[in-house]
Image: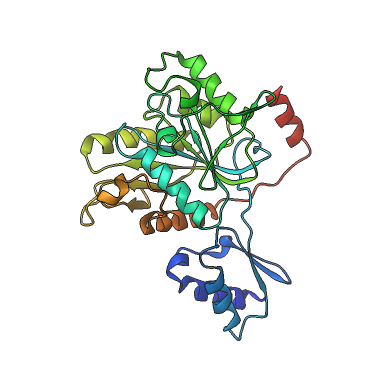
Amino acid sequence: MSKNQETKLIDSLNSLPELQHLHAGCINITETDIGLRLPIALIQDKVHSLVSTDNTTPAFNIKQDIPTFQALKTPHPKVKNIIAIASGKGGVGKSTVTYFLAHALQKMGAKCGVLDADIYGPSQALLFDIDENPQMQGKQFMPFIRQGIQVMSIGVLANSNKALMWRGPMISQALMQLYQQTLWEDLDYLLVDLPPGTGDISLTLLQKIPVTASILVSNPHPLAEMDVKRCQYLFQTLCAPILTTVMNMEAPSQLRLSTENPFNLPFDQKFRDQNPIAHPEFLQLAHVITSRLCHLPIYQPNPFDQFQVDRERS
């Protein structure tokens, strides 16, 4: 396919509302295939129809081809991309955003997992209706499977009705244990629900785990805006690209935060429900972040990768 044909193809695909953020980095074209580097299960037929009716484009197979994007650490062998979801202040809806975003990604055809690392208030066990201890395979945890999503929560390690009175080293060790000793199964995206603020968990995650990118969650209140800017500074300093800042419970006419590429979520009663529904707003958010991930370079393995993984696990 020539460069001119590729440009026309991208323009055609951008005509689909779901792919309005598509760019050249989202497409991998070979002699026989057009691979989209983002989940396309909901729109594969539309894409195939669009390409088939374009007389300037040769016949290609359309397939989903989600790569591992570049991170500062060696990737987990079973997790392609890790997305940290953080907030400067608690109570802004970070865990709810994580929950619904996971369902949206899964609905779009991605293999998605959630790691609940919010030591101060692990909510994913409640949201995903987990009230049991994880099964073990040797010394490793089997993730819970809910609606096709793989879930592990730091809340299953302690009584959910009691505060986890752990000091910094214990918290960091628990996070690494859940990350390394959970038998994740070939995930495209692992969403990590972080505790609010910029403490031990966030630092451990960014310094020891191959975080691909991050999403910040805030709400329109000035105090939440002030705190999320501190969180933004942490992620920028430690080189974790910020895909977007989700302004939760936001009126359409308001946009207080000056963060680049914000995404507004309206204040809506339906988001209080725990029903595992891929709401249109979260499907749109999922399309935005997966297309923005494609701006990142693709990870290139080297012969020392497996050695480093084995050393970190030992």
Check the image and name the residue furthest to the front. 132
Rendering coords of residue 106 (x, y %): 52, 52
Can you say whether 269 is above or below 120 in the image? Answer: below
Left or right: 278 with respect to 26?
A: left
Check the image and name the residue furthest to the bottom. 55
Rendering coords of residue 238 (x, y %): 50, 33
Can you say whether 100 is above or below 202 in the image? Answer: below
Can you say whether 62 is above or below 85 in the image? Answer: below
Quarter of the rendering occupied by the N terminus: bottom right
Residue placed at 72% from the left, 25% from the top?
Answer: 311
Q: Quadrant of residue 228?
A: top left
Q: How many marks?
A: 0
Residue placed at 45% from the left, 65% from the top?
Answer: 18
Which of 110/80 is in front?
110
Residue placed at 60% from the left, 81% from the top?
Answer: 52
Left or right: 302 with respect to 57?
A: right
Residue placed at 51% from the left, 47% from the top?
Answer: 147
